Amino acid sequence: MLRLGALLLLLEFSPCRAELKTWVVDAVDTFALGTTQGVQVHPDSLVILAQLDEDVNVALGQSVLDDFDKPVPLTDGAIDLVRSEWISGTNHVFDKQFTVDLGLDRAIKRVRVLAGETALNQPEYFVRGYRLETAAQVAPQVWHLLAEQPDNFVLNVDTSADSTWAATDERGEAIPREGRFVRLTIIRQDRSNWVAIGEIEVFGVGYVSEGFIEGSFAPSMLVNVGQIRWQAERPERTSIEMQVRGATAEGAEEPWGRVTAHTEGEFFYSGDEPVAPLAYRARLTNSAPFVSPALKRIAIDYDPVLVAQQLLAEVVVSNSLRKGEEAALIYRVEITAGVDDYGVDLLRIQGPLLSVTAVRVDGRELVPTESYTWGSTPDREGMLIALAPSEQINAMATVEIEGQALFVRDKTAMRFAAGNKAQGDRDGYVNWQQGQEMPGATWTVLAAGTPLQLLSEVQVEPRPFSPFADEYARFAFVVGNIEEGREVVLKIYNLTGRSIRQLAQMGSARTYQFEWDGRDGSGRVVEPGLYLYEVGIEGSDKARRGTFVVAY
């Protein structure tokens, strides 16, 4: 098996992008063409969250609990009899409390307590005295006074109208107080009357908590999308997520809810291709009222020259496949390329690493090493087949890749993409063109059986290992039962417990292989002797440990 990691890293991360076209959104006039909700396009900071309207009730629809931790309907936007109000049922209401959870910290400037409909029919059923307090998300048990009125004579409480706000400036304006929780305490009762409360409303200032901007670009032809780069400022307690999607020739496009959201500033397009038009969606959020992230620039590479006109793939595997057992399979790809396309000489399959036993093009078996090479992708989440220049596909062809793989999940989607090495050399990275499932077929493998244990036994080869005679010591194992990507770590220690080397890979449930060159963290070859290893997974206390020998 030929190593292809260095080749792929060179192709994907070279800075040269001389030939690719780029759609750029980086100015007020271009961002202003987008559709916005909850954001504003600002001349200085470009796209930021919108200012919170002081007349918007931020408590609407949030949860309210009484002092027995029972929910009460005081933020549903209604004060209807019984169904949407709270009635005391007794005149003993002193120290009764209601706590509104706003969901995140707000800059609270005003609170209203509306009487229930019962109180409208019987006006004496109003709150005789109240205290309003707030607590921040970081210290929910520390309450700060917002407003207090021990002798209330109005049906509806409004802190801006009643001038009860505790903190005001020199003009008498209410100074906002940051908090997530708002607590109403009844501090006076009347022996002859009950209390009916219909609604608790909270109003604030600053920025709204979330919003988005969407924009689109319609190239004159179907294109192959490459790298997406975007710049933003994200102060503490704020975030931005970026999504990019395209419509295929059939007009199909993924709903935004199914498009991967990225927080890193660079990523590669992963939807079906070729596409046109292109669209982006940036979602801005904050959990602090007076700060906002700012979206500065979006740059999307695209190529009007395709790798191929169409790429369709399916996987053929036994229906009796069981998790944790190696299975034989055939991965079939139908390629349609024309004279104006780059052509296909790189094939990438995301999913478990195949141990390739044969590659056929239109039924003709290719010669390993001479006609093709294969190996894992740099992220170890898939495999790559590189065809020799003489085998490049520039017309219609069916490629069959036969091999064996280990499946550890209930469902494993083996997505396919094709590339062209000359394009990667020219533009600085391989602009993979994502394939699609064959109509009536699938590239998803189903495996039956009980879930695998989190970590399998670790196989170490060779034993003993010599840094001078062997290229690497290999640590192979299977991780099961994790769907989301996590950090999988190999740690090597000497017999005194001193850390010698730590290696890590990001991934999910699959087969892992770590390769250690016999050197410590400083690059020195370790002394011969007995060493310890430990394999673990981020967020888990489960680990596999063992020993191996380094010999000269």
Image (cartoon, grey):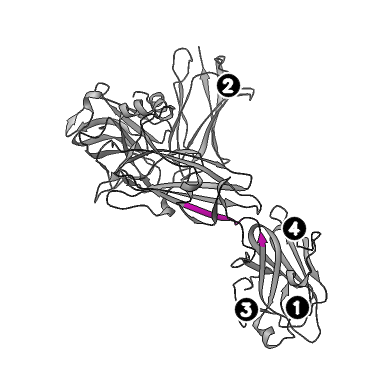
State how far apart marks 4 and 3 are (Cα). 29 Å
* Residue with the mark numbered 2: 521
State how far apart marks 4 and 1 are (Cα). 25 Å
Of mark 4 and mark 3, the one earlier in the sequence is: 3
Q: Secondary structure at mark 3?
A: loop
Which residue type carries mark 3? Answer: Ile
Q: Dot 4: few (<14), some (14–19), or many (≥20) neighbours within 10 Å?
A: few
State how far apart marks 4 and 2 are (Cα). 46 Å
* Residue with the mark numbered 1: 127
* Residue with the mark numbered 4: 141
3 or 2: mark nearer the eye: 3
Q: Position of residue 394 (x, y in %)?
A: 21, 32
* Residue with the mark numbered 3: 79
Question: How many numbered discs sit on the rendered protein?
Answer: 4
Of mark 3 and mark 2, the one earlier in the sequence is: 3
Residue 136, picture quadrant: bottom right
